[in-house]
Structure formats: C-alpha cells, structure tokens
Image: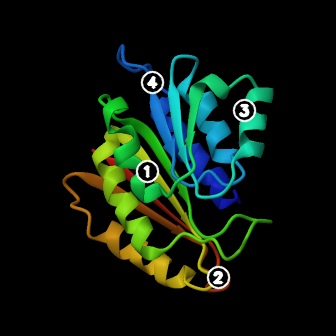
Amino acid sequence: MLKITQLAHLLVRTCFAEPSSDSPLFAIDATVGNGYDTLFLAECVGENGMVFGFDIQDMTAVRSQLAKRGLAKRVTLFQTGHETMLSHIADSADAGASAIIFNLGYLPNGDKSLVTTRQTTLAALSQSLMLLKRGGILSVACYSGHPGGEEETNAVLAWAKALPHEEYSVLHHHLLNRQRTSPELVVVQKI
C-alpha cells in the first residue's frame, strides 16, 4: 500500500498529465516543511511553471535542495503562514493553480510546538478554493496524533464534506484497520 504522501502525489500528478493552455502552470505547497512536496511540484510544473511555497519555519535547507536540483527558478518561498497565501500570490494566479498540497501537523524532526491549527488551516483551505483552477486538485494530508491534530482533522473533514457536490469532487482516504490516529488524506477536485 502506498504511503499517504505517495498517494497524494499520484493523484496530484494527474493534473499535469495533459498539456495546458498557453499559460504557465503553477502550484502551491501550503506547508513546505522539508520541501518534498515543493520539489515534486517544481518538477510537475515544468520549466516555465511556478510553485509558491509557504511555511512559518526556516526554509534554508529547502532552498539548498532546490538549487542542487536546478529547480530554484521555479519556486518562490514565503516564510509566513499558509493562511496568507491569497494576499501573496493573487496577482500571479490568474490562470489558477493546477495543484495545492497541504501536509498538516508539525515538521518531522522540527520544533513540535510549531503546528498548523484549525483556524489557519480552514482559512487557507478557503483561499485555496479561490486559487484552484477547474480540474485542479487540492490535497490535504491530516495527522491527528499530536495535540490539536484531531480537532484540525475533524475540521478539515467537516469542511470537505460541506463542499457543494456540483462544484467539487471529494475523496477521503483512511486506513480502517489502523489506530484511530493514522494519517488521513482528503483530496478535492474542482469540477
């Protein structure tokens, strides 16, 4: 079975499978962390595309990885919370994002006191819907095994369940035979 992040990448990659219009592709990594999703998205958008990344933690290591792989020109990083994404990229987002990825919780091997929260995540998810293009995918990996994580996961699930089915298709992936705090994936496609 694929890890939750592998499944998210598999589904997100479908947004980039067909050639797009003349507009360059763009994507958003709403929670940069170690930069794995940022690197993945930078490869997906191609030479002329752009990835916007957001995180409240230092991203020096991510910048270094992007430079080593020759992808730095495709990525603009903002050291700020994901709930501010619309104010930072609205002018650059005319064509709409092909994909937006969230990995909620805390940065593995990072400061565990710095976590995403229900309030900032719900604000960022609402902004994401405004930025997502038709056919684009929003992927949200939820981790409930830390303080506040279950509350945030439940808020994300309630938010996703309330999306109008005429405008969005919503998938929820959760391993049924694992502990209650196993990761969950919510994938929203704008139709």
Between disc 2 and disc 3, whose residue precedes?
Answer: 3
Q: Residue at x 61, y 86 (%)?
A: 147
In-image side of 77 versus 158 (left or right): right
Disc 3: which residue: 66
Q: Coloring scheme of the render?
A: rainbow
Q: Which mark is residue 138?
A: 1
Q: Amino acid at mark 4?
A: Glu
In-image side of 76 versus 85 (left or right): right
Considering the numbered disc 4 on the image, is that residue within a helix, a strand or a loop? loop
Verify CB contact (< 8 Å) between mark 2 and mark 3. Answer: no
- The CA distance from mark 2 to mark 3 is 30 Å
Between disc 1 and disc 2, whose residue precedes?
Answer: 1
Q: Is residue 29 above or below residue 83?
A: above
Between disc 3 and disc 4, whose residue precedes?
Answer: 4
Q: Nearer the viewer, mark 2 or mark 3?
A: 3
Q: Nearer the viewer, mark 2 or mark 4?
A: 2
Percent position of residue 26, x then y: 46, 31
Considering the numbered disc 1 on the image, is that residue within a helix, a strand or a loop? strand
Disc 2: which residue: 146
- The CA distance from mark 3 to mark 1 is 23 Å
Verify CB contact (< 8 Å) between mark 1 and mark 4. Answer: no
Q: Quadrant of the C terminus?
A: top left
Disc 4: which residue: 18
- The CA distance from mark 3 to mark 4 is 25 Å
Verify CB contact (< 8 Å) between mark 3 and mark 1. Answer: no
Between disc 1 and disc 4, whose residue precedes?
Answer: 4
